[in-house]
Image (cartoon, rainbow, N blue to C red):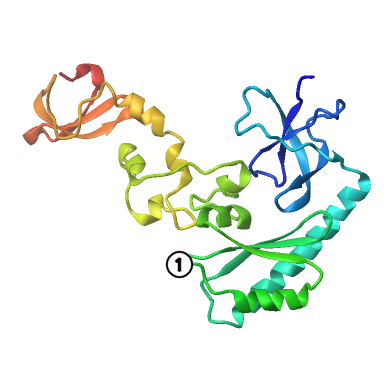
Amino acid sequence: MTSLIVGIRFHEGGKTYHFDASGFSDLEIGDFVVVETTRGKQLGQIVVFVDPEGAKGDQNWKSIIRKATPRDLVLRQILEDKEAQALGFAQSLIQDTSLQGVKFVSAEFSLDGENLIFLYAYEGKKDPELQGILSDLRDRYPENHLELRRIGPRDAAKIIGGMGACGKGIRCCTEYMTEFTPISIKMAKEQGVSLAPSEITGMCGRLRCCLMYEHEQYIAAKEDLPERGKRVRTPRGEGKVVRLNPLRQEVLVDLGESGVQRFDEQDIE
């Protein structure tokens, strides 16, 4: 029997996880299903059908428990209201302590309501001491299994949402990015972007994810261009390359007394 593997997301713009749907032949993209996860039973939405041979991972896929019922959907809405209240309570606890560097960004109930996970961000190198906070949370939610999980600044920014550093109405990470790719300062240099913090830093305080969008195109476009600082011949004389415009295949050359002038790549020797 051929396995039917589907990709499921638990949050809009979230990461896609693979599950075995072999027992459900009538599933369609957009359907909601109930699955078992490390955070307990969760409600997820099918976003893609996956070729089993091309799926990543060890291929020990968990099976879908059932298609979501109207009751599951209503329950999820009720839990979202409870999550907002739980998050507000956790944030209020931090305000009354010296742990001002800790920021609670999300509270997540499992679908059965048994597990409650709080996600928090913290810039320190070591995990903060949160035993007092956890104790207060247990007093408030004695019937739930509680867990505090630390997440990175990019993940926190994705959850919080809001306007991007560029002025875009919604941050790219929140809108559609499902995974984070390592970003380096070299990407900014390759693209000739100003290295001023305000130009390359996102709302998360890290290098902007958009620096990776055109990185490969810039690398490919620069293959036939001379390096900065190299002396070249132009139709107007010999000079030194001071800047490149890879996407336009243009080279800016300092010709001394004639100043800096712009040339197409094919006019450079």
The x and y percentages for residue 17 are 67, 39
- Can you say whether 130 is above or below 117 in the image? below
Q: Is residue 210 left or right of residue 37?
A: left
The x and y percentages for residue 23 are 85, 29
Q: Number of marks in the image?
A: 1
The x and y percentages for residue 234 are 14, 21
Q: Residue furthest top?
A: 266
- Can you say whether 202 is above or below 181 in the image? below
Q: Which residue is mark 1?
A: 124
Q: Is residue 264 left or right of residue 79?
A: left
Q: What is the crowding at mark 1: few (fewer than 14 residues within 10 Å), some, or many (at least 20)?
A: few
Q: What residue do we see at 48% from left, 41% from top?
A: 181
- Can you say whether 105 is above or below 234 in the image? below
Specify the amino acid type for callout 1: Gly
**Disc 1 element:** loop
Q: Nearer the viewer, residue 148 or 232?
A: 148
Corner quadrant of residue 16: top right
Q: What residue do we see at 87% from left, 42% from top?
A: 68
Corner quadrant of residue 269: top left
Q: Nearer the viewer, residue 110 or 86?
A: 110
The x and y percentages for residue 81 are 80, 62
Q: Is residue 36 left or right of residue 240?
A: right
Q: What residue do we see at 12% from left, 25% from top?
A: 232
Q: Nearer the viewer, residue 52 or 27?
A: 52
Q: Quadrant of the N terminus?
A: top right
Q: Is residue 241 left or right of residue 131?
A: left
Q: What residue do we see at 49% from left, 49% from top?
A: 166
